[in-house]
Image (cartoon, rainbow, N blue to C red):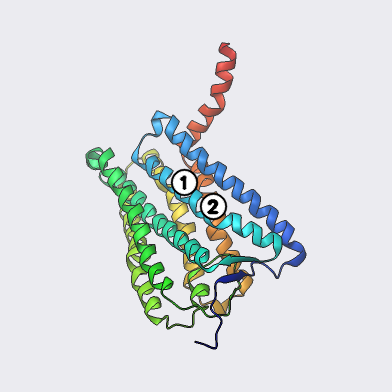
């Protein structure tokens, strides 16, 4: 240990391979980040302002929007600086802190998608008891549990990381501080942390994913039994947007963290991470706006209200 220099700062290389195309990438990420913030804020405003959206599904959707805003804000601003300067320096404490919030928001996202799947399951498969089960107090409890579990699960991984000795190298060939790149900087034994992360992935990723799949199997079986075509379309339309978001989220998550890194290039891994951390939070409000009739109606009313008020004057 005495022959190593202790790491206090980390050099994030970002997208140094792109060179002259970094300005184009910077512009794309900046536009996507602005669209992400504005789109998710719009969802929150719509659900808050229109009474016909005051239902559990849209309450959970606002929590998803808040999570998306926090997730992308944790990554995108620093990533823009790294792209613009072809790299960047971050302190070790700030790097670990960034990973903590990244992990917390990702766990929160998994849990929120599970809660929203359960909400759709009750609404379609057990509609008579839906209102009695999904009352306001129960929805608040679910959201509090999701936020607490997100913070606690991330803390269970980050606390052991803070006890590691980081003695170099101090270079991460990535644009943010992720789990594996961060542990590679440590000269301590990280086997226990890898095992702990593997076990924790069961309750925070695997179990929620299985619950989502089971919920939609029951939903599909219920929709098939609906006699009228219009009834089937109405039932499917209430969950199609959520199913699309789930598919994109878990598809990208599996692509990044289950496919061995030696089977894809480093640039491909970075682009998948960009899609996961920046693009997906932008797509969520777009998908809900395009595929949900209630959200579309609220958007139309928001556009018409200024015209109506102007004509009345």
Residue at the (50%, 61%) spot, across then down: 98
Location of residue 139 by image quarter? top left
Residue 38, which numbered label? none
Using the image, determine if residue 307 lies above or below residue 122. above
Residue at the (38%, 45%) spot, across then down: 60
Say which residue label 2 marks. Answer: 73
Using the image, determine if residue 195 lies above or below residue 279. below
Is 194 or 214 nearer to us in this picture? 194
Q: Mark 1 or mark 2: which is in front?
A: 2
Is 242 or 188 nearer to us in this picture? 188
Residue 298 point in image, percent of width and height: 48, 31
Q: Residues within 10 Å of mark 2 (few under 14, many from 20)?
A: some
Residue 65, which numbered label? 1
Residue 101 point in image, percent of width and height: 45, 59
Badge 2 marks a residue whose secondary structure is helix
Residue 254 point in image, percent of width and height: 47, 67
Can residue 287 be seen in the rendering of this structure? yes
Badge 1 marks a residue whose secondary structure is helix
Is 211 or 87 nearer to us in this picture? 87
Location of residue 158 by image quarter? bottom left
Circle 1/circle 2 CB separation < 8 Å: no
Residue at the (47%, 53%) spot, across then down: 245
């Amino acid at each position: 240990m005495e022959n190593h220099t202790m790491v206090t700062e980390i050099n994030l290389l970002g997208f140094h391979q792109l060179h002259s195309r970094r300005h184009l990438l910077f512009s794309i990420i900046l536009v996507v980040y602005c669209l992400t913030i504005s789109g998710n804020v719009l969802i929150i405003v719509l659900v808050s302002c229109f009474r016909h959206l005051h239902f559990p599904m849209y309450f959970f959707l606002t929590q998803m929007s808040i999570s998306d805003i926090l997730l992308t804000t944790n990554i995108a601003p620093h990533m823009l600086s790294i792209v613009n300067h072809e790299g960047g320096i971050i302190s070790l404490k700030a790097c670990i802190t960034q990973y903590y919030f990244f992990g917390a928001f990702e766990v929160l996202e998994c849990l929120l998608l599970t809660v929203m799947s359960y909400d759709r399951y009750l609404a379609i498969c057990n509609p008579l008891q839906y209102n009695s089960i999904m009352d306001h107090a129960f929805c608040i409890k679910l959201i509090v549990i999701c936020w607490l579990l997100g913070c606690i699960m991330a803390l269970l991984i980050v606390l052991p990381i803070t006890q590691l000795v980081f003695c170099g190298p101090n270079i991460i060939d990535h644009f943010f501080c992720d789990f594996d790149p961060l542990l590679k900087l440590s000269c301590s034994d990280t086997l226990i942390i890898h095992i702990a992360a593997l076990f924790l992935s069961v309750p925070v990723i695997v179990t929620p994913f299985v619950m989502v799949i089971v919920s939609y199997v029951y939903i599909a079986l219920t929709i098939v039994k609906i006699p009228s075509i219009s009834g089937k379309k109405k039932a499917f339309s209430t969950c199609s947007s959520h199913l699309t978001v789930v598919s994109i989220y878990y598809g990208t998550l599996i692509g990044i963290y289950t496919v061995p890194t030696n089977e894809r290039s480093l640039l491909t891994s970075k682009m998948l991470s960009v899609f996961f951390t920046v693009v997906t939070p932008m797509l969520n409000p777009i998908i809900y706006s395009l595929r949900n009739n209630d959200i579309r109606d609220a958007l139309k009313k928001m556009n018409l209200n200024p015209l109506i008020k102007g004509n009345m004057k």
